[in-house]
Image: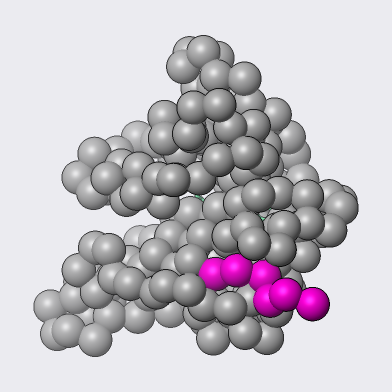
């Protein structure tokens, strides 16, 4: 169970990720929330690292399977003075009605989901996103370039052991089967991290 991994590492998550966070993740988080508005789901919100970039005036639900990660997210929201609906839940079965959110965002979440859950997770996020809304994913991908491949191979045992994460999650191939149109897919940190924007296919 992934929530057990994250319940265990919650007290040290931000410390372990600090170099990545300061070095490059913050810039990408800002970009992923740019231009969003209305009702937004931060799916797998963790300790709330995206919170500084929630658009002003939006109503955000920060959902995560790990109560321990969310306790930190709650504290972060309070310290930022943000009114965020922080709640424990499974992004595979969120319980929200169809088309509930204007935008659904998942950052560094698909990398921790097992391969067989990539499609069900994306289907659920597509289901709860309004027609005309967007699903945005920021996550690791399999690099093509030599140095990046070497780097991902080097850090793979560490991120696998500590974060239950990997660089080769197959979320992009699940976009169409999940009922989404891919609007944009681009590398945003070398060829190691991608930002995807997709829209629910109109019925
Ligand atoms: C690597 S952390 C990323 C957290 C945050 N999105 C960020 O960008 O820092 C992955 C998060 O996904 C959450 N998660 C994994 N599987 C989940 C599921 N099925 N439902 C909800 N949250 C889940 C974990 O508890 C963890 O907090």
* Horizontal and vertical percent position of residue 9: 51, 42
Residue 96 visible, this angle: yes
Q: Which of 132 and 58 is in front in this view?
A: 132
Query: In the rendered view, does 149 fall on the left or right side of 107?
Result: left
Q: Which of 192 and 27 is in front in this view?
A: 27
Q: Residue at x 34, y 49 (%)?
A: 31
Tell me the quadrant of the picture where the N terminus can be found.
Answer: bottom right
* Horizontal and vertical percent position of residue 48: 51, 34
Q: Which residue is drawn at 84% across and 58% down?
A: 98
Q: Residue at x 62, y 39 (%)?
A: 38
* Horizontal and vertical percent position of residue 3: 67, 50
Corner quadrant of residue 131: bottom right
Q: In this view, does 76 lie above or below 19?
A: above
Q: Is residue 81 above or below residue 173?
A: above
Query: In the rendered view, does 63 fall on the left or right side of 112?
Result: right
For the view shown, which residue lies furthest in the left direction?
147
Query: In the rendered view, does 55 fall on the left or right side of 1?
Result: left
| Segment colored magenta | 198-203
In the rendered image, residue 200 lying in the magenta stretch gets the answer yes
Q: Which residue is drawn at 72% across and 75% down?
A: 202
* Horizontal and vertical percent position of residue 114: 61, 73
In the rendered image, residue 202 lying in the magenta stretch gets the answer yes
Tell me the quadrant of the picture where the C terminus can be found.
Answer: bottom right
Residue 111 visible, this angle: no
Corner quadrant of residue 27: top left
């Amino acid at each position: 169970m992934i929530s057990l991994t994250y319940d265990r590492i919650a007290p040290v998550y931000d410390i372990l990720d600090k170099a990545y966070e300061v070095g490059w993740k913050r810039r990408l988080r800002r970009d992923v929330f740019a231009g969003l508005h209305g009702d937004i789901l931060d799916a797998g919100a963790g300790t709330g690292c995206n919170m500084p970039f929630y658009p002003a005036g939006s109503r955000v639900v920060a959902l995560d399977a790990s109560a321990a990660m969310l306790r930190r997210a709650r504290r972060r929201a309070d310290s930022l003075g943000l009114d965020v609906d922080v709640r424990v839940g499974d992004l595979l079965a969120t319980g929200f009605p169809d088309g509930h959110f204007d935008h659904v965002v998942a950052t560094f979440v698909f990398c921790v989901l097992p391969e067989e859950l990539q499609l069900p997770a994306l289907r659920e996020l597509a289901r709860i996103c309004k027609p005309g809304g967007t699903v945005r994913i920021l996550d690791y991908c399999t690099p093509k370039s030599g140095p990046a491949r070497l780097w991902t191979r080097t850090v793979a045992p560490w991120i696998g052991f500590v974060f239950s994460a990997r660089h080769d999650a197959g979320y992009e191939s699940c976009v169409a089967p999940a009922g989404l149109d891919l609007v944009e897919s681009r590398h945003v940190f070398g060829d190691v991290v991608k930002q995807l924007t997709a829209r629910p296919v109109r019925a």
